[in-house]
Image (spheres, rainbow, N blue to C red):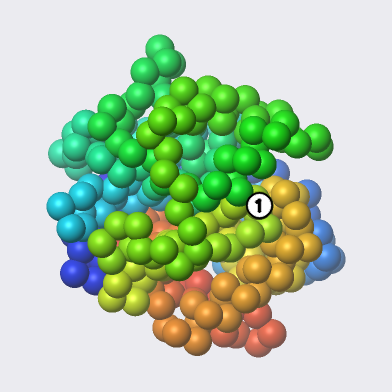
Amino acid sequence: MFHRFSLGEMAATIVSDGPLTLDAAPKIFSGPPAEALDAAMVAAGLPTDRVRVEQNCLVVDTGGRRALFDNGLGSRKLYGRQSGKLLESLAEAGIDPASIDALVLTHAHTDHCWGTMSDAGTPNFPNAQIYLAQAELDFWTSNPPGQKRERSIEGVKRHLLPLRDRIHFVRDGEEFLPGVQAWTTPGHTPGHLAYLFAGGWCLTGDVAFHHPISYVFPEAESAYDVDPVLGAATRRRALDRLAADKLQVVGYHQPWPGIGRVEREGGGFRFVAASDAPC
């Protein structure tokens, strides 16, 4: 599944790695009462017994470079049977994995970098240089203690460390590709990056990963954040900027294909899907 569009002056395509099925919202988010979380789900026309999120991987052609932002879960079926579709979606879009020369990661969680290597241990994107924050790689290679981190540690060892010589660290505010600038947004992980694009666009990664909960309750702490308190503070700060600057958004986990904008609503926000984007 794919969707072509113009990201400013850049030719862009969203390619799907397929949806993920997670626990019910009260098991993921803390702070708001369970009844309020369920009410927000019902108001959005969503079931309350589970959370479903997409994996919208962005391909951008800029300055003679072809960049893929995040690459999904690979062949592992950790969150349902519908993931692992990235290579199929790229083929449907007519995009050769060998044509990707920049593999840009928001962070190194399982569902963002486990498509880097094939099951045979060879790179799925053989000509790609890898871009991420040094704080991200440093964190996961330090074997941080804590529940639910073993998979990410395993994934970094399997998918990133074999390609260590291809990794280029990007800094906050750096324009590391033509028209693409890194924006440090820590909390979800220590080195989490969002990306700003010329023409008023932002790829948000997992700063606000769920529609509607992350927007209606930006201060709700997420079980998936390495630092939930910092994650909530970063989320509020990022959503404030996205709304104030009227940036167009590409959301990795937002409803397919993840394109829209952020508006203030009450004490929180809402994600408004682009009217011309297919459902």
Give the image quarter of residue 10.
bottom left
Give the x, y percent position of residue 239: 57, 75
Residue 45 visible in rendering: no
- Taking the image as shown, residue 103 lies to the left or right of residue 158, namely left
Q: Residue visible at 55% across and 47% down?
A: 134
Q: Is residue 125 above or below residue 188?
A: above
Q: Quadrant of residue 208?
A: bottom right
Residue 114: percent from left, percent from top: 49, 31
Viewer-side residue, 95 vs 103: 103
Residue where numbered disc 1 is placed: 190
| Quarter where residue 199 is shown | bottom left
Amino acid of disc 1: Pro
Query: Residue 174, percent across and down?
Result: 41, 63
Identity of the residue drawn at 31% across and 44% down: 102
Q: Position of residue 92 (x, y in %)?
A: 21, 37
As helix, strand or loop, the secondary structure at mark 1 comes to: loop
Residue at (81% x, 67% y) in the render: 32
